[in-house]
Amino acid sequence: MKIRSAEAGDVPRLLEIYNHYVEHTHVTFDLEPVSLESRMKWFAGFSDQGPHRLFVASDGADLIGYASSGVFRSKPAYARSVETSIYLAHDRVGTGAGTALYTHLLDGLAAESEAHRAYGGVAIPNEASLALHQRCGFKRVATFSEAGFKFGRYWDVTWFERAV
């Protein structure tokens, strides 16, 4: 497996990975598949340096997932806090790719940016993501009850944090 910074040409595959979760799972609270145009705007919010990063993992020619750090909250005092996210191709969950990819993102943030804290939200149940966050040094800080409504029911979200 190879991990590198994402490029614009990766976005269609990243969109395919993400939209699988939109359509088939509760782990993201988007309700409709995201458009390529929208995802290109999302991609423009990342850079090769600083706190807002986007990395992809590949297995040969196939992109198998991505991890990102983006804006946590928009007010200026939050600038050194980031919200992290990770999505793997659904058939790659449980292979160790997520741990390698998330670790790469977090190590990069620690070495190359002014980020101070990383936050990750996990719509539960999601044992794989809960375990990943704990494995990568996050600590559980809160659970927001019934924070999202999707597929005809409410879902809780557990939030994690870790120093960068």
Image (cartoon, grey):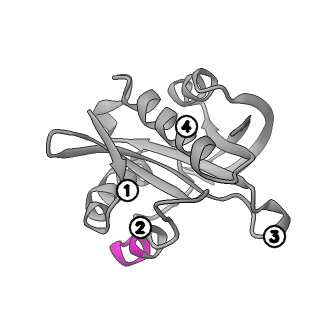
Assess disc 1: are there few (<14), some (14-19) or many (≥20) residues with their C-alpha within 10 Å of its C-alpha.
some
Is 64 situated above or below 33? above
Q: Where is residue 142 in the image (x, y as percent from the top left)?
A: 81, 36
Residue 150 is labelled as none
User: Is tag 3's residue or tag 4's residue first in the polypeptide sequence?
Assistant: 3
**In this view of the protein, which residue sits in the foreground, 69 or 129?**
69
Work out how far the residue at label 3 is from the one at label 4, CA to CA, in angstroms. 25 Å
Assess whether mark 4 and mark 3 are in contact (beta carbons under 8 angstroms). no
Drawn side of residue 95 relative to residue 157, left or right: left
Up-down: is 120 above or below 134? below
* Circle 2: residue type: Val
> Which of the 4 image quadrants contains residue 101?
top left
**Which residue in the protein does label 1 denote?**
19
Residue 82 % position (x, y): 67, 53
**Sooner in the amino-acid sequence: mark 2 or mark 1:** 1
Q: Quadrant of the N terminus?
A: top left
Q: What stretch is highlighted in magenta?
A: 35-40
Mark found first going from the N terminus, 1 or 4: 1
Residue 87 within the segment the image draws in magenta: no
Give percent across and percent down for residue 118.
69, 44
Marks 1 and 4 sit apart, C-alpha to C-alpha, by 27 Å
Query: Is residue 126 visible in this depiction of the protein?
Result: yes
Magenta stretch: residue 39 in it?
Answer: yes
Marks 1 and 2: in contact by CB < 8 Å? Answer: yes
Tell me the residue at 33%/50% (across/down): 17
Using the rendered view, name the quadrant where residue 73 is placed: bottom right
Element type where label 1 sits in the image: helix
Task: List the residue tagged with mark 4.
Answer: 107
Q: Which amino acid does label 3 sit on?
A: Lys
Q: In this view, does 24 lie to the left or right of 119?
A: left
> Foreground: 34 or 120?
120
Q: Do we see residue 27 in this rendering?
A: no
